[in-house]
Structures are given as C-alpha cells and as structure tokens.
Image (tube, coloured by chain):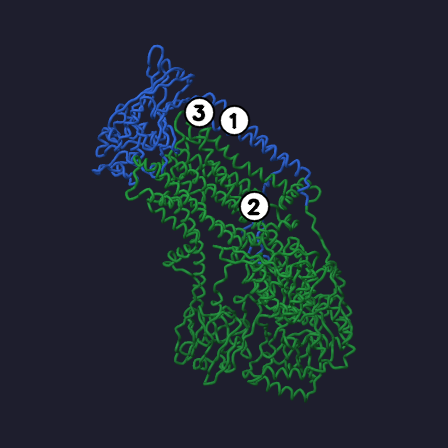
Chain colours: A blue, B green
Amino acid sequence: MGKEKSKSGPLARRPDNSAFKQQRLPAWTPMLTASTVLPSFYLLALICMLLGVWLLLTVQNTQEMKVDYTEAGSCNLCFEMRKNVSNAGQKCTCMIMFSIEKAFKGDVFIYYGLRNFHQNLRRYMDSRDDGQMLGRKSNLKSPSSYCKPFDVDEKGVPIAPCGAVANSMFNDSFILTYYTINGPTVVPLLRKGLTWYTDKNVKYRNPKMDNLTLPEVFEGTTRPPYWQKPVYQLDPFDPNNNGFINDDLLVWMREAAFPNFKKLYGFLYRANKPFTKGLPAGNYSVAISYNFPVQYFKGRKEVVLTTVSWFGGQNHFLPIAYLVTSGLILLTAVVLTVVWWKFGKDGKNMAD
Amino acid sequence: LYDNVCAVDVKANNRFNYNNAIRTSKYNIFTFLPLNLFEQFRRLANAYFLFLLILQMIPQVSSLSWFTTAVPLAIVLSITAAKDASDDINRHKCDKQVNNREVEVLIDGELKKEKWMDVQVGDIIKLENNEFVTADLLLLSSSEPLNLVYVETAELDGETNLKVKQALTVTGEMGDSIEALATFNGEVLCEPPNNCLDKFKGTLTVNGQAYSLDNDRVLLRGCTLRNTEWCFGLVLFGGPDTKLMQNCGKTVFKRTSIDHLMNILVLAIFGFLATMCAILSICNAIWEANEGSAFTMFLPREPGVSGSLSSFLTFWSYVIVLNTVVPISLYVSVEIIRLGNSFFIDWDRKMYYPKNNTPAQARTTTLNEELGQIKYIFSDKTGTLTQNIMTFNKCSINGKAYGKNNRGERVHILKDFLVDFSWNQLADSKFIFHDHSLVETVREGNPEAHAFFRLLALCHTVMPEEKKEGELIYQAQSPDEGALVTAARNFGFVFRSRTPESITVIEMGRKVVYELVAVLDFNNIRKRMSVIVRSPKGKTTLYCKGADTIIYERLHPSCSNLMKVTTDHLNMYAGDGLRTLVLAFKNLEENYMEEWRKRHNEASTAMEGREERLEELYEEIEKDMTLLGATAVEDKLQDGVPQTIEQLAKADIKIWVLTGDKQETAENIGYSCNILREEMNEVFIVAANTAGGVRRELQSARRKMCPDAAEEPSVIKARAGLFWLKKTETVQDEKVNGEYAMLINGHSLAFALEEDLELELLRTVCMCQTVICCRVTPLQKAQVVQLVKKYKQAVTLAIGDGANDVSMIKAAHIGVGISGQEGMQAVLSSDFSFAQFRYLERLLLVHGRWSYLRMCKFLRYFFYKNFTFTFVHFWYAFFCGFSAQTVYDEWFITLYNTVYTSLPVLALSLFDQDVNDRWSFQHPQLYAPGQQNLYFSKKAFVNLTVLSCYSSLVLFFVPWAAIHDTVRDDGKDIADYQSFALFAQTCLLIVVSIQMCLDTYHWTAVNNLFIWGSLAAYFAVTFTMYSNGIFVILPSAFPFVGTERNTLNLPNVWLTIVLTSLLCILPVVAYRFISMQIRPTINDKVVQEVLRDKKHTYLSTKPPQAIKVFLITRRSGYAFSHSKGYGDLVTSQRFLMMRPVKSQAMQFSHIAPTES
C-alpha cells in the first residue's frame, strides 16, 4: 500500500489491505498425512539400515588394543612405590608384554588412556590461564587468579604454565618393542604432530623471544610443582616442540570431556621395515617410565594401539545405533501402517 | 465532607498556592534509571535473574561467567526501559504542551495571558469559544442568555454531544464587567477532589448569603467550550486535583488464565529446580567423600572449603547452571506475542466499520489468548445488539393506522414504495416512510393529522442547529425523540428554532411562532412529557406524549372508543417490536392558565419541597386530555446480529443479555436476534417480588428442565493459584434435554443474587440455552458477571456500549466496548473495542482462537526447548563429578534463548494458523478446545516435560556414546570437552529447530527466514567466536578457538547429529500420526477437510455460507427511552439579565443519557 495515502477523508482510519496485516501471507501448510508419513518412515528405516551396515563394515576393518598397565606385570612395584608421595622424585620403570594376533594395517596410533581421571571438573578446567599460554608477557609473570593455588610457588615466583591442568600433566613415557625372530626391534614412534593445527599455531604460543633463548624468556618463572623439569626443557632439541607449544603439553591441555579418556602419545613411523604396512602380528613389549600416580583417585592407566578409518577410531556405537534405530523405525512404520489401515484409511474418524 | 475551602478574595489578590501544572510523566532524566530499574526489578522474574547475577559474582559459586545472565538480563531490561522511556517522553511532551497553553487570567483588575501551569486555585479566568477548559471551574458568567454555557465533553467521557452548564444568577449578573469580577468577593466550600464526573457539591457564599452549587455550575477540565462567545470561571481545582486527572487513576490489571497457569508453572519449576539442585548437591557430597577427596592431590580445595561446604556451594552453582528452566525471555516473549496479536486486531480490515470510520482496537494488549477461551458472553442490548437508531415506522392517528410492515422484505424495497417528500423543502432526505396515504391525509389538511404532527413538532426538548439556511440538524437527548421530530419535519411540521420562550415551527410552509408557556419535563416516574404553548391566535394548548398506560389514565372519558382502536394498534406495533408512544392534547382556558402559571412560578422558586409541589401542579393540569394517536418507532437491530449469535452458539458460547429495558422489549429483541426461538421447549419467566417467590420459580424451572438433578447443587471445592492459596468453588454443568430459555427481571434478580439464592440461580440459569435479564441496574450486571466468574471458573466476556455497561465490562475477564452511539465511556474502560456487534464473531472465532493457539504452541515449545537444554546439564553432572560444569559453551548458553531460538518461535506465535479465517467461521466448533483449556494445561505441561526429558537423554547419551572412546580420522582428539560441547550444542539446536518445523503448521516466508536464518546465525556466530582473531583479542573469554574447524568437518559428528534428530523427532511424529488416526481432534478434521477441499477446488471455491431466515413472531411490548430533560432550564423565568437572542440557534443536549 502506498505510504503517500492521504490520512483524511471518510476512510482515513481504514487499515491497509496488505497480506501481512490481514494475516493472509501466502503459506505452505504441510500435514502429517498417511501418504507422506508412512513412506518416509519406511524410507528412513531403509536408509538407516544401509548406513548401519556400511558403518559396521567400516568399523570391522579397524583394530584396537588396550593394555592396562596400572598394576600389571612389573608395574606392580612402581604402582606400590607411587603410593608414597615421598617417592615422587624417584624413577621407576617397568615392562609389559603383549601380543598382537592380527596385524594392524595402515596408520597405527598409540595412546595413553586414563580412567576415572576427572579433567572435566569445573574448578579443574578453570584452573589455567589461556593468556599466559598464548605467550602474553604480562600473564606470564602474573598468572590469572583462576590458577590458584598453582599460580605462584611458596616464594611468590610465578608458575609457568600455571594452574591445576598443566600441573597434573601426564608424565609416563613408553618405549614399544617388537620381538621379531631376529630379536627385539624398537618400534619407531613419531612424537610430533599430535595436536590440532589451531592449538599448535593459534591457541598456544611461546612468549616473544626477541633474540633471547627460551630459558631466558621464561626467566623469573618456575615449573609447576609436580613437574620434573621446567617448561622450556620439555623438548630441548626442537624449538618448535618446546615451551608452551610442546605437543604433549598441548594434548594434555585439551581437557577430556569424560573421566575415562585416551590421549594421543604418538604414531607409528612407517618408513622402515617391518612397519611399512603397520604393526605386524607378533609379540610386543612396552617399557614404561612409570611416573603418574593413579592410586589416589582409584584410576587406571593403559596403552592403546588403534588404527583408524575414514570414520575415525574404532567405535561400534554408531553402526549398532543405526541398525537398532532402523529396526525401531521399521517397527514404528508397521504399527503406523496398521493403525492407519484400521482407523484412518476410510476416513471414518475424520468425517464430521 | 467539605474539606476543600477556597476563599476567593480577588481584591486582595490573595492567590492560593495550588497551581494548575499537571504531571502525567513518571520519570525525569535523573530519576529515570533508578526508578525504572526499581519498577522492573519488582517483577519476580527480573528479581530472580538479578539474584542469579549476584550469585554468579561469587567466585566460589559461579559456574557460569557473569555475562551468561547479564547479557540476556541487560537486553530484557533495556527493551523494557526503552519502551518506558519512549512512553514517558511522549507524556512529557504532552504535559509540556498542555502546561504551556495560554489563558486569560484576571490579575490586579485586568486580564493577562498566563500559561496554564501558572493558573492557581482562586484565579478568575476568561475562556473563549472553542477553548479547552483550563481547570475545574466554577462558572461565574457567560455571554449567552441565562448564563448558559455549552460544552463538549469528548475528552472527558468521549461523548460528542453538547452539554449545558448554567451559572448562578448572583454571579451571572456580573457579566463581562471586569470591575465587578475584580471586586467579586466570595467563598467556596466544596467537596475534596474526587473522580465523580457527574457529581459536585458545594456552596458559594457571597455577601453572607450561601448558594448551593451542583454539577451544572461547574466546568470540568477536559471539556471544550462551544457556541459560547466567552465565559468567566473561578478555578476550584487545579492540575492533579481536577476530575479529569483524578480519573486517570489506576486501572485494574486483568490477567489471563494462562498468566495464572504460567505463574503456577513457574513456581512449580522453581521447586523442580530446587529439587534437581538438591539431588545434584547430595550426589556431589557423596562424590566428594569418595572420589573428590582423593583427587585433591591434583585439585586442592580452596582454603576454608571442606567437602560439605563444597556440596553446599555446588547447590548454588547448579542453581546458576540450571536456571534456564525458568527462561528470562519467557515473559518478554509472551508480551511481544500478545502485542503482535493485538496489532493484528487493530489492522483487521474486516473489523473496520467504514460508516463511522472506526477500526477495531485492542486497548489492552495482554489478554489476547483469553479471547480464544470465552465461555460466557454478557451483552447489553441497546446500542450493542441494536443500532440505537430509531426510525419512525408507523403511527395511528385518530384510529387510523398508517405505515406498512416492511419486515422480512427489507431486502427488496422498491423505490416507488418510498414516500416522496420533495414538496417539503425542509424535509430530511434520509427519512424513509412507506405509506403514501399519510402524506395525502396531511396535505388534505386533516385536522387530527395536523394536530398529531404539531404535537410532535412542539412537545420535545430537541435543539435545532441550522448551520446553513434550510439545513436543519436536530440535537436530541434520545434517538426516539429525534426520530419523532424528524418525522414531523418531513410531514410538513418543521421544528425550526427555539428560544427559552418560544418555538418556531414551519407548518405546511407557513411560519408559526408559539409562545412556550411551560415544559412539563419527562422523568422516569412520570413517564410522559408535556408542553404548554400559546399559539399566535392566543389559544393555549397542552401537548403530551408518554407511555400508553400512563396517558390512558389521564384521558377524557369521551375518548374511550378511540382508545380501544388505538390499543389494538399499539398491540400490533408492540408485536412488531416497535417502541410506542401515545399522544394526547388538551386545550386550556386562559383564566385557569394564568392562575396555574402563577402557582407554577411560585412552586418553581420555592426553596422547600419544590419537586413535590411541581409534581402536584403537573398532575393537576395533565388530565382529561384528548387522545390523538400513537407513534411506533423501530429500534433497529444491528447488521448480522442473529447470524453472529448463531455462530457463537455453535461455538458453544453462552450468551446472556443483560438490559435495562422492560421485559417485553427484551423479549422482543431476544426473538428478533434469535437467542429466543419458537422451537424452544419453554421460556421461563422469573418475576417474583419476594425471595421465597423467586426461589420457588427458580426451583420449578430447574425441576422441569432436569427432573433428576439433585436438590443441592454439587459444588466442587478446590484450591488453586500461587501456593494453592486461592479457594475455588465450581458448580458443574448439568445435562439438560431440550432447549430452554429464561427471563429474569431486575427485581427478582436482586433477590436471586443474595447469598442464599445465588447458587440456585446459577444452577438453573446455566441449564438454559439463553438467559435474558431485564430491568437490571449497572451494578446487577456486574454482579451477574461476578457470579458466573466465581462459580463457573469460566472465561467471561462482557460487551456493551454505554456508561451503564462499564461496571460489567470491568468485572468480566474481557470487556468489549462498542464504539457507537452512546458515547465512549464503555470503550474507555474496555479491553477491546469495535463498532459493530457482528465483529465479535471475528474477534473470538478468528483472532481469539488464533491467539490462543499461538500462545499455547509458544509456551509448549518454549518450555520444551528450555527443559531439553537444561536437562542435558543434569545428565552431564553424573560424568563431571557433580562439579556444576556446563555441557555447552558459555556463549551458547548466553545466546541460546536470546538469539538462536527466539525468532523462530516468535514467528510461529505470530503467524501460525491451523486453518484460515473462512474455515474458522465455517466450523465454529474449532473454538471448543480453547474453552476446555486443551492446548496448554498442567497435563500438557507434564507431557512436554516427559518429552523434553527423553530428548535430553538422547541429546546427551547419543553424542556421549558416539565420541567418548573414539578419535578423529587422523588419530587426534575429539573426545575433549570443547569438541563435545560444540557437538552437543549443535545436536541440541538442530533437534529443537526440527521440532519447531514440526510445530509450525503455517509456513510463511517469515517462518522460513527465521528458522533457517537462526540456524545460519548459529553457525556464523559460532565460527566467529571460535575464530583466531577474536581469541587473540580476549583469550580467556573465547577459549574455544578452532573447535568448530576440527569437529564439524567429521562425518562421525554429522552422522550422530542425524541420529539424534531421528531419535528425538520420529517418536513425536509417530505419536501425532497415531492420535490423528485414532482420535482426530476437531482441528485435524477441519484441516483434513481443507485439504480435501483444496483437491476439489473446482467444485466450490467458497465454503457454503448458511443463509437463514429468521422468523419473527408477534410479541407485545413497548419501551420509552428517555431521561430527564432541560425543560425547566429553558423555560426558567428566574434569570435577570436578558440578552438579545442570538441569530444562531442554540444547541444543547443532555448529560449522560441514563437510558439503557
């Protein structure tokens, strides 16, 4: 309607005859009719079934092996030792044997798993300073109060990286050995490139160097109390994997959503035989530098080996869920059809 | 009583300190913020969120950043504040404009211009024609004869006709003499400021003599001076003390039943919230004891916080996390929806009445959905069902009946049937008459016919207005009278002008000036009116018109034959539902007249017993009259009333007519508008004069209708409302076979409304299809409404047009005012207003139904989406050690209600329609679900809670199971908290959006835009907030950097989203489909029919509209609509200052017609 319409005369207050004001906007009115609902239920059941089968086949092709080493084998001793806090400084190594029945084909990933470790407690998750780990100089020297009580040590020296998350970083290390007929071969592991690109390049940065070395930059800070070595010595050989951008630190800093989780430790270096096609079947051992105490929180530790598909790691839930859903939809569809056949088909109920 | 003393001593210029400035604004610049915030925080919801905000400021408790509550709260507060501010700015502007108007004030013996706000009590001011009255004034003198002043009170009560005020003689003497006025010395003692527009009490003391003051002496602020050159007034009340401002007081807030239900639900939700938090904090205590204490190695407790204190703090933390069960945006959204739906009412062209350019108006914007739940309608008759336009339809002159019955053939009146009045140049062209013989009789010079019309031209209190030569406009106090005078005008007896002492009539083209000797005015007891006039020939005649029974008692016995014939005619007219009057005259002897006139003068100036003495005199002279004939005036029904009533009846709405009219009239109208029907089993009439009689009549009616009903009414007592404090009593409806109707007169109603009879009344009356209460007072109207409200727990609507309907309009849940003939009082106190009764059908069946539907859909969806959102946190608590960790990103929590999901649900609740208006009319039964509260009740609430509980289980555990033990295709992490948060919130948003799509029935472009736009906005905002740039600016506020790039590109995630959607939505679809097949609701049926109709559009494009012919049978009855007039004022002999009568005709009408 024209806005210029003069607002006088006998019909001055007559409302505009626009579709909007008269509530006559053109509209599409879909309805739940038998002809739309029933076919779509059957179709959805079919699609879910196909998806489920496809996913199941995919998942069947992946392999996974979990080795709980909390108290297993010689680790038992270390477990007992770590019960006593006063032994925290002592080293303890142990070894676990396991065998792989079927070769792991393709890329193999090695994880450490923790059970019953609550990285998702609210106060735990808050206990970090993203500004500090972004390399902000001001935050480096005066960490956020969220980091308390791991913000400064008893002498008032700021902790870098501060907070409970960094302090509790997982510090076991593994050496995987493959026992061939020719004798043991150390399985070569790549320990870099474990993190999201954004974490490595955006979220975490070392403080600006300005021709200083990393230890100089971190001068005036101290290591988190549970750490054995300061942050600038996490990987003294590779400046791109040291300080705040150390892969292990980054992996740990990405807190898990649930108390049982696994985190990437490294992946198989496939350049040399016999690992070019993955991990061959056979006997393996894993030597563990056993540092991380779990008995306090009734936790478990494990080493996980897995292969992946396009669909990610081994995960049987989705294929099974899709198959179950498909079955349920089919069942519902049949029920709906019966109901429609009995009540709605002739439209008797619908008649006024 | 008299505590406002205002002495006037102008000589000393002793001005009072009460000025006339008004302030309707609430705030000024400095007080706005504190006052407005205070006002807003008085609302429970806002206070609650303020409390939450304070909780979040406590670091030990804060589980969410402060902005999650602060941002929505700020948005809500600022929207409301902006609205309040703009309202207040407008008020400021108005105030300023009003306060700065200028008026002439008498200061120091001369007139000076002053601003309104500087005028003070005790000032004497001069007003000129067409000026607004500055303050409440005591009228001192005026330019008009008799010190009359004409005012229009449109601003005060909305009535546009002119009213007359008259100054006291003692002050009127002063005229416009400035010296006299400046030396005027008096003292006024009057009542304290109040809001009664039609009452004023006080005394003026001048020179030791006291004069009583009443409403006629006072000009009220808000009136406009008309047809008066100037007048002087003394300011009695200024500014806020004026009656206008006193009337601007508080209006009663009406709340809808959904509001009440919502309050109860919100309270229940608070309880639920407390329970959830208590459960979680107990779990937290257990967890802390078992696991948390062991974990202190990695996460030491804060100093001074033990395990038990920590679980106490957890309780409050969870109050914060789970607060979204009571969403802050709920109340704001509800207000927006109601406002939007009110605008649709304002904009509706089909409720616009072109004849007087009146669109429908939703004056209260908070009651819309209640319009869809009306169970009882209480309607006024005059002006509501009828047009209150009277047409002179028939007459009986000297035993001969004129006028043809044109009922039933109204549609095709042939042009030739109409009487041609072109011979009469002063005739009103709008007048229509259908009998040629009457004109011929008149033109032949039949003396009775002449006397008949002469009477009609003389005996009335109508004022003529002749703006242009020959263009007469009559200002009549009642439409009946106007119709009669107009009839006389067209038949050649044109009432041309009047002065206090004379009436000028053009009789068949000849000008005759009658001397007006006396007006014996109408009142409700006399039920007649007479004038005594002296013709130019010197003959003195009394002309009288009145109710048949009254006149017949006073006729000369010689008329008995004529009386019989006329009675027959009267019965016939009454049968046609016409209002009748009987006319008579009497020739008076000169001597007797002189003597009577002397006595009349004495009586009318008597200080004591004036009324009684005049009454005696009137009684004495109005006897032995000669019958002339009778008139029949048609009270026209409004267009479409019977059809509307039929439609509303089909929608199972009960219509009660409450009228001040006589029983016969009411019955007639009842039949003509189809609420009474011939085929009804019985129409009971309750007209007893004692309480016992009323009880007996009611009981016998009840036994007849429902013989096996229990003697004692079954009253279900229940408790409802907040904290179950409100006791309710409900009387169940009882099944009755057959259709019955009941008429109760006001007298019986008074007994029936007593405490011991009201239940009996209600039971009996509710068994009837139709109830008509006649001769009821405004108070009784309200009592009836309240009775039904109290015992039926049903939604009531009152519709009326006059001042007498105001009480019931205010008492009912919804008041509707007809903006029609009787002024605006009803409209001013109503919630909705429109010009014609028939629009009620559209208001209820279309707007009301849609509003209800939309509001219920909105509430159901709103609670669903918030519960689903919140319950996910509850499930997550079992995985995060009950530490009050949220599942979602804080920004998502902040924006979920305000941005991502608010617009689609608003679009739904503004545009959704199940079927369009045509089909709504076609199937009035669609209205029933609203009356039965089907769409949103406690049961529906429980259902949606269960559904959202299920959805939240799916939405938490499916993503959990899908990613808790898996990795990306490159072996990297996706089971981390941030990925899971993003994952869970995306699932949630997609599921609630699909649910929205499922609930949307009417997909307009806006719905599409909002739904898809909101989803797009979600992704856009998420990508922005998780982007590198914004992280670098504020690393601690946006720690989720990169999450979406690493998560949303995984097939795993999308497959899970699809799965959650299927699992959440398909059960709902299946349930709806099954219930539609097995137990289709009326909506489903109609929608199916629409669908079928669309397929067969070639058959018919329009649903067939039932055209029904309403048969009307003969009922006897008549009415006489009249109120006390100004007869004595016009003829008053007591005025001293006679000024030459102005050429311009005076014009006046009456204050507030009391007719109903």
Answer with the quarter of the image where residue A334 lies: top right
Residue at x 62% of width, y 38% of height? A33
Q: Type of residue at label 1?
A: Gly
Q: Let me know if marks 3 and 2 both belong to one chain.
A: no
Q: CA distance from mark 3 to mark 2?
A: 46 Å
- Relative image position of residue B621 (x, y in whole percent): 67, 83
Could you say which is closer to the camera, residue A333 or residue B373? A333
- Chain ID at mark 3: A
Q: Is residue B564 above or below residue B757?
A: below
Question: Amino acid under label 3?
Answer: Gln
A68 versus B756 height, above or below: above
Q: Classify mark 3: helix, strand or loop.
A: loop
Expressed as whole percent of the image width and height from the top left, the position of residue B383 reads 63, 64
- Circle 1 SS class: helix
Q: Which residue is mark 3?
A: A314
For the C terminus of chain B, the quadrant is bottom right
Residue type, mark 2 in image: Asp
Q: Which residue carries the number 1 mark?
A: A52
Residue bearing mark 2: B912
In the image, is B714 to the left or to the right of B409?
A: left
| Tag 2–tag 1 contact (CB < 8 Å) | no
The one nearer the camera, B757 or B1145, is B757
Q: So how many labels did they put on this image?
A: 3
